[in-house]
Image (cartoon, rainbow, N blue to C red):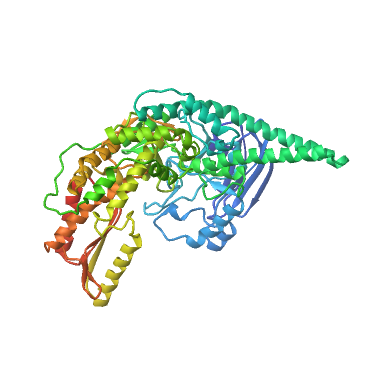
Amino acid sequence: MEIVDKQLCRKLWDSDNMEWVAKPSSGAFGGLIIIWNSEVFKKVDVFEGDGFLGIYGLWGPEAHPCILCNVYSPCDLEKKKILWGSLQCLQERKGGRSARREITGFEEFILNNGLMDLPMLGRKYTWYQLNGQCMSRLDRFLFNDEWLTKWPDLKQWGLHRSMSDHRPILVKNEAHNWGPKPFKFFNAWLYNSGFTEMVAAKWREISVHGWGGFILKEKLKMTKEFLRVWSKSSLQEVDRKIEESKEEMNRIDVKAETCSLIKEDLFLRSSHYTELLKNMQLTEEMAQQKARKNWLKIGDANTSFFHKCIKGRWRRNEINVISIGGKEMRQVGDIKQGVMKYSENLFTDEGWTRLKLEGIQFRTISEADICMLTEPFTEEEVKTAVWNCDSTKAPGPDGFTFGFIKNEWEVIKANIMEFLKDFHSNKKLVKGSNASFLVLIPKTENPQGVEEYRPISLIGCTYKILAKLLANRLNKALNSIIGENQSAFIEGRQLVDGVVVANEAIDGARKRKSRCFIFKIDFEKAYDKVSLSFLDYMMERMGFDIVWRGWISKCLRSNMVSVLVNGSATKEFSMTRELRQGDPLSPFLFLMVAEALNGLTSAAVAKGYFHGVKIGEGELEVSHLQFADDTLFMGEATEDNICTAKCIMRAFELVSGL
């Protein structure tokens, strides 16, 4: 692009309402053009240098001052350093040589200038080598915080490319209505004067009859509606008080500059300062809860910081385009419907009868532990379970955090105990008490397909109290029924124990100069694919009684789920398989499912079909180690061993669904 004229710019812009500035190419160094709508943007000044062209001007009818800078990075490493380094991240390159040395300057430039790189929607890469072996994200827009505050709904889209090896990028400000947002309780409300007494009065005022779980659910629902209305007026009142305190303090400061203050003025200024501090802390804690920065304490950062965290997290997690079954979806309705259907299919059991493990031996639970698991719930036990729950975790469909439950404990504990009593006696979980939201958390930067999201369940307080109680009891019994090969989640065992054994096995093989094979397995969506029927079968084989198994079955089969897509819930659907990530019971129940793999492998070793690795002077044989949903097979490097390991995994898949 050695020559830039109006004809070329008009071909690119396709409009008469345009102005432009250009920096022609120099040899292999590409040229730069900035074209703008002359009715929207008014140029004030232009600046340029080696590898960049910039323009300063006023944007829109409000004449917002802004700077646009177009950069073309040279290929020479030293020149890259001068021009802030290569425009790419380590995760944004596929094929070709490493660019670790080249990105440092650019990363420092971004950090030092407070710039933000928006996620690119629709595509991962912007440059493609002709042979198709190398791809990279070389092109991007960078924005500072002021720009993103002014246009909070900016999206960066990768468009289709034609003859060029670079993909065009489109940035536009577009807001979508994803639907109503569910109620969410903010712990900052607890610090409002008279809040506890207000909630207690409302709770006692509500009259509901029926099962304990129904009464608790309805009281929480009515309290939620009351707080929804109260919070709107309360927040307006807090904002008004903040402004009022600022004005009064400013008035007294102005007076102090001209004359001495009397005692009443000093007292008034101190009172307004105290009131301002209290209300600022309220708004700051609400922002902190939204930002999910739990490692920061109140006062360690200001509200502006939290708002930036909120906006940054929202941009990273927002779903504007998603690929499901090879079909790309961009419309609000299509995305919500597609995600819901995908989740519903994922969590639906195939419905066919699975094989049994009749020839495999498992440890059985003791009579004492059976009695311990099903004894009546005590208030002390329930309170301990509640206080062990994080007060700041994101709430489920009921909208309440455990901060609320703990603060209002004396008022609501009677209804909680009645709900638990009904469950203990009748396995009763009323509709709605076991509902949960499913949120999709990106597993990678710039995810494209639905498989690149991790589903996490946000569970309501009512069910979570029950699940926590059952999980605490089950944890006490697991040590005697789960094999030593499993080292995750069990009291008295550490994950590092398995790591030490694995290192011993490898070191021993090296010293003996013997060949061995090590095979690591990570089950895809392990919790999501567990067959609930197989879990019940494993509990039966381990000797759990019909009462406990009935409780667990009720907990797992009564849940209703809706997916939160950009903060708005889809329609509810039921789940016939899956252990919910976020359910306190899930890690311990999964251990019992994984014990089937332990049993299969141990049986193969006992019958001489699989030969493990010898460790230590006693020649102890180790064949496998299990770390929750990760498994490590270790054995002699023989074809028979490898075939046996494959047979074990296939058998485990057939019986468990994993």
- How far across and down, in percent of the image, does residue 331 sit? 42, 31
Does residue 529 appear in this view? yes
Residue at the limit of the structure toward the right, as seen here: 259
Image-quadrant location for residue 323: top left
Does residue 585 appear to the left or right of 537 in the view shown?
right
Q: Nearer the viewer, residue 133 or 557?
A: 557
The mark tally for this picture is 0
Does residue 460 appear in this view? no
- How far across and down, in percent of the image, does residue 344 sit? 30, 34
Q: Nearer the viewer, residue 193 or 1?
A: 193
- How far across and down, in percent of the image, does residue 161 sit? 43, 42
Image-quadrant location for residue 582: top left
State whether residue 482 is above or below residue 584.
Answer: below
State whether residue 607 is above or below residue 310.
Answer: below
Q: Nearer the viewer, residue 27 or 242?
A: 242
- How far across and down, in percent of the image, does residue 451 sit? 34, 43
Q: Nearer the viewer, residue 353 or 53?
A: 353
Does residue 17 appear to the left or right of 557 in the view shown?
right
State whether residue 333 is above or below residue 277.
Answer: above
